[in-house]
Image (tube, rainbow, N blue to C red):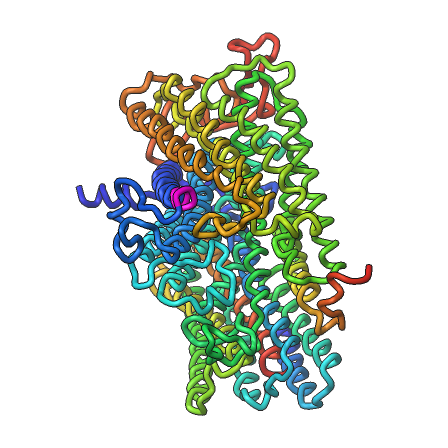
């Protein structure tokens, strides 16, 4: 009995590991969301106690239930860290990637199953370290998710050091995962599954894996260097003559604070493409399936995602336009940043054009996929002024930036992830999720997200800086925009409320959802030819897989049920 | 074994050259060149990279490009002391 | 349940999974050490003064270590070469070939482990020598980089030695049951070990000579 439980917990089956990633990441998304609700409240009603549970936050963090500035900084840093590294990426890459990719390429499992399990447990360990950092003296890291030096170097307490340790664990987990994905996609495609028969979802995960593999080590290096600064007294990021709180810092000096920024953003920029690429992959699958026609411009999309991945490595300093770099190098990064919008637009346009002439089914996954398009479009367009140095000057570090990237990640990526959950739920459980609850979840989330993030553009344009404890109360020129914080916090409560529909739907449908057959969405890709809920033991397919067709052979004249699966002869 | 011999010779060479106490620029060029040669020998012959498959060459090529890109981006952005440019450049002229 | 292409080569790529995997891992390692080298270049070039490296560190000891590590790479190649030509014979059931190959392999892998151990001992001597002269990572950025870079490298040596030791000892069971897969393992582990050697080939001139 005990051996059986241990084998389940430390399973090397990609489907079990995918679910482990899935549940863990959904938990962390909830944690990250809870942190930011506190921030929203503090902005709307600065200095007022958080209702109901304020007193539970602890006297150190929130005396009298009022969020202290120090705790606020922890909330900000950890909200970003948890959402990006513990929530979205593990869900998009670890959960969806692990579960679906081997099935879609016709493989029995990932190339390195034990490495896969190791990746998950490293991630879980990193998550534990991050959570533990909240309760050590001094609290969690409080230097932004970007941990800029020299502040992060000298920050008191163990929170920042634990952040570094947690990041090293998470990075190692991602690196091993990336190796696994790349090797699996290259080596374990079923006979007949040529490169241009791969579902776009697999291509997206493939490029994502390369981004993780080659960009994360820079942050590993930076974390090691900062760890040495914090623990061994080195000054890699501490310049000479640094004065802290009126006292000259007792370090050798000679370091370069901007070195941290370069190393961080060398990862940081590809990281945001790691956030969006799996989402584009999911939307592509859902759109093709629910328009009953092939994707428009599939090959173009594949070439675009290659170019996008490659370019993402050479735009990073557009996060650093205000650090005093020379005009020539600034022009280089502006140019690459502008150019990178091209493949993004090509992919978005292809998805939109895929709708034209389609026989559209408006089920819950499709609703989320449809909303993804304008939301991602708005997020992307608002990035353009940020990518040009001159227009970035007034906008850098304002709420405008926050609105820009949240549009891409929240009604962008997270909507795509919801689409994926509703879409692949019947494959995983053999049951359907409830459509009514799904529609309510969708409409409520869409409205609330826009009420939360749209005003931030206005605030940012008025000059309101990000990461301010009082939400910008000191800006006399931006006072009218600050009143927007009040509807924003109620929309945040609303967003939390509408997630209940999702959580209840998910948990109840596992046991009591309408039973589904092997292929309820009448889809063409290989995962739907596996048994209704692929068996826990290795070996996903009843018969050896052989692929004969392109990924989206929908509405083929003469085909029964209006589509041909990839392995149909 | 030839490779071992070559590596030993190159190691002695690089130590020997260092005793010449050349000025910075040539010293760096020579030192890194010798190191690159030794590394290439180890990679080609010990790691069997010579005659390896394209599926290995492409990721490694991309990696090499990105490494150069990182160093270049870093030095060009922060290397005013190397290239003689000044902070003022960011806001004047051009 | 067998994962395809773990030991056999996939025809269109010409690779086994572990061979591809180790090169992908090394690509990330190149970016890791590359980031650290980039940091070294930036910090050194931007520093108004920099210690004369070969006066702070011992070039003879490091040159010895360089030779030792290169030699251990050679013995690693020979360890693999002891096994690879004989996998077919072992599969056929030739116990004599199996025994002889295993003996030669054990000899060379043992020498590789010895080389790694000598390297680490010399490194330890160097470190202790620095500490006894009150030279610590915090003393200046050169020493900080020296300890960090060589420390991280030494960590990679240790991990490599742990894996090599396992494959010298308990891991050899696989030689009898799946000789080709075992030989492939030695090749893959060898590639990692050679990479550790390559990193040192760059660390030596950069930290000691220039």
Residue A428 is one of the magenta-drawn residues: no
* Quarter of the rendering containing residue A87: top left
A360 to C161, vertically: above or below? above
Q: Is residue A250 left or right of residue C47?
A: left
**Residue in front for this viewpoint, A470 or C36:** A470
Whole-percent x, y for residue A230 in the image: 43, 70
If the image is split into quadrants, where does the C terminus of chain A sit?
Answer: top right
Residue farthest to the right, as pictured: B94
Identify which residue is drawn at 57% across, 61% down.
A261
Which residue is painted at 52% across and 68% down in the image? Answer: C196
- Which residue is nearer to you in this view: A467 or A118? A467
In the image, farthest residue toward the left: A1
The spot of residue A484 in percent (x, y) is 49, 37
Image-quadrant location for residue B93: bottom right
Residue situated furthest front in the rendering: A476
Q: Position of residue B29 (x, y in %)?
A: 73, 76
**Quadrant of image for the N terminus of chain A:** top left
Q: Is residue C143 visible?
A: yes
From the top left corner, tell me how far across and down residue A415 is, in percent.
48, 31
Evaluate whether residue C89 shows in this view.
no
Q: Nearer the viewer, residue A492 or A136?
A: A492
Tell me the residue at 66%/28% (across/down).
A349
Q: Main secondary structure of the magenta part?
A: helix
Q: Is residue A565 left or right of residue A232?
A: right
Residue A413 to residue A470: above or below:
above
Total label count? 0
* Residue C18 shown left or right of residue A310 in the figure: left
Looking at the image, residue A108 sits to the left or right of residue C141; the answer is left
Region in magenta: A39-45
């Amino acid at each position: 009995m005990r051996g059986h439980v241990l084998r389940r917990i430390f399973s090397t089956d990609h489907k079990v590991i995918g679910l482990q990633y899935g549940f863990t990441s959904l938990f962390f998304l909830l944690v990250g969301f809870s942190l930011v609700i506190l921030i929203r409240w503090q902005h709307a009603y600065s200095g007022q106690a958080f209702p109901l549970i304020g007193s539970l936050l602890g006297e150190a963090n929130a005396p009298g239930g009022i969020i202290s500035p120090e705790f606020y900084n922890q909330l900000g840093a950890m909200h970003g860290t948890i959402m990006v590294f513990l929530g979205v990426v593990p869900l998009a890459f670890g959960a969806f990637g692990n579960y679906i990719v081997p099935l879609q390429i016709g493989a029995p499992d990932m190339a390195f199953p034990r490495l896969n399990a190791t990746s998950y447990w490293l991630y879980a360990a990193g998550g534990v370290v991050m959570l533990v950092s909240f309760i050590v003296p001094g609290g969690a890291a409080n230097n932004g998710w970007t941990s800029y030096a020299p502040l992060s170097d000298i920050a008191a307490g163990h929170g920042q050091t634990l952040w570094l340790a947690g990041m090293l664990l998470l990075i190692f987990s991602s690196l091993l995962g990336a190796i696994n994905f790349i090797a699996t996609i290259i080596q374990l495609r079923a006979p007949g599954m040529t490169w241009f028969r791969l579902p776009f979802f697999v291509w997206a995960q493939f490029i994502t894996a390369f981004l993780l593999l080659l960009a994360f080590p820079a942050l590993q290096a930076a974390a090691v260097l900062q760890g040495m600064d914090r623990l061994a007294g080195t000054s890699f990021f501490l310049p000479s003559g640094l004065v802290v709180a009126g006292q000259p810092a007792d370090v050798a000096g000679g370091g370069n604070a901007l070195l941290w920024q370069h190393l961080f953003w060398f990862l940081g920029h590809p990281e945001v493409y790691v956030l969006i690429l799996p989402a584009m992959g999911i939307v592509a699958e859902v759109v093709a399936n629910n328009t009953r026609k092939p994707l428009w411009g599939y090959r173009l999309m594949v070439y675009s995602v290659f170019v996008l991945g490659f370019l993402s490595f050479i735009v990073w300093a557009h996060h650093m336009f205000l650090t005093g770099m020379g005009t020539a190098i600034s022009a280089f990064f502006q140019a690459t940043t502008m150019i990178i919008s091209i493949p993004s637009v090509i992919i978005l346009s292809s998805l939109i054009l895929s709708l034209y002439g389609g026989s559209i089914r408006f089920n819950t996954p499709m609703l989320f996929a449809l909303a993804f398009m304008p939301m991602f479009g708005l997020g992307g367009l608002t990035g353009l002024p940020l990518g040009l140095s001159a227009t970035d000057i007034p906008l850098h570090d304002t709420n405008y930036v926050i609105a820009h990237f949240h549009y891409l990640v929240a009604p962008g990526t997270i909507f795509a992830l919801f689409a994926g959950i509703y879409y692949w739920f019947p494959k995983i459980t053999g049951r359907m999720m409830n459509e009514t609850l799904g529609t309510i979840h969708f409409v409520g989330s869409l409205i609330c997200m826009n009420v939360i993030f749209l005003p931030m553009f206005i605030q940012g344009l008025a000059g309101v800086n990000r990461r301010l404890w009082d939400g910008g109360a000191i800006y006399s020129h931006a006072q009218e925009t600050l009143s927007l914080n009040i509807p924003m916090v109620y929309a945040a409560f609303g967003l939390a409320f509408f997630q209940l529909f999702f959580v209840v739907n998910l948990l109840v449908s596992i046991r009591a959802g309408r039973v589904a057959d092997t292929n309820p969405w009448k889809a063409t890709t290989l995962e739907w030819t596996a048994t209704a809920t692929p068996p826990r033991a290795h070996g996903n397919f009843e018969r050896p897989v052989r692929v004969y067709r392109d990924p989206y052979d929908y509405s083929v004249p003469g085909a029964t049920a209006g589509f041909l699966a990839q392995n149909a002869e | 074994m030839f490779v071992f011999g070559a590596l030993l010779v190159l190691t002695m060479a690089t130590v020997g050259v260092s005793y010449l106490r050349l000025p910075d620029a040539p010293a760096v060029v020579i030192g890194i060149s010798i190191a690159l040669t030794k590394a290439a020998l180890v990679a080609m012959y010990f790691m069997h990279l010579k005659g390896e498959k394209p599926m290995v060459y492409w990721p490694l090529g991309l990696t090499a490009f990105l490494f150069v890109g990182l160093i270049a981006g870093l030095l060009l952005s922060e290397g005013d002391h190397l290239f003689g440019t000044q902070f003022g450049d960011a806001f004047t002229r051009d | 349940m067998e994962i395809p292409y773990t030991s056999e080569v996939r025809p269109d790529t010409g690779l086994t999974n572990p061979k591809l995997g180790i090169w992908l891992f090394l690509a990330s390692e190149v970016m890791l050490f590359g980031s650290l080298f980039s940091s070294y270049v930036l910090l050194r070039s931007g520093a108004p003064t920099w210690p004369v490296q070969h006066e702070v560190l011992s070039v003879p000891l490091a040159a010895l270590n360089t030779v030792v590590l290169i030699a251990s790479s050679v013995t690693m190649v020979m360890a693999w070469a002891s096994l690879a030509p004989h996998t077919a014979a072992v599969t056929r059931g030739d116990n004599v070939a199996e025994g002889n190959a295993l003996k030669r392999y054990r000899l060379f892998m043992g020498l590789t482990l010895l080389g790694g151990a000598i390297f680490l001992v010399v490194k330890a001597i160097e470190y202790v020598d620095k500490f006894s002269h009150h030279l610590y990572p915090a003393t200046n950025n050169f020493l900080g980089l020296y300890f960090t870079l060589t420390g991280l490298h030494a960590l990679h040596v240790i991990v490599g030695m742990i894996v090599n030791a396992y494959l010298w000892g308990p891991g050899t069971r696989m030689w009898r049951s799946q000789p080709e897969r075992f030989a492939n393992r030695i090749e893959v582990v060898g590639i990692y070990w050679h990479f550790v050697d390559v990193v040192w080939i760059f660390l030596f001139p950069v930290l000691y000579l220039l």
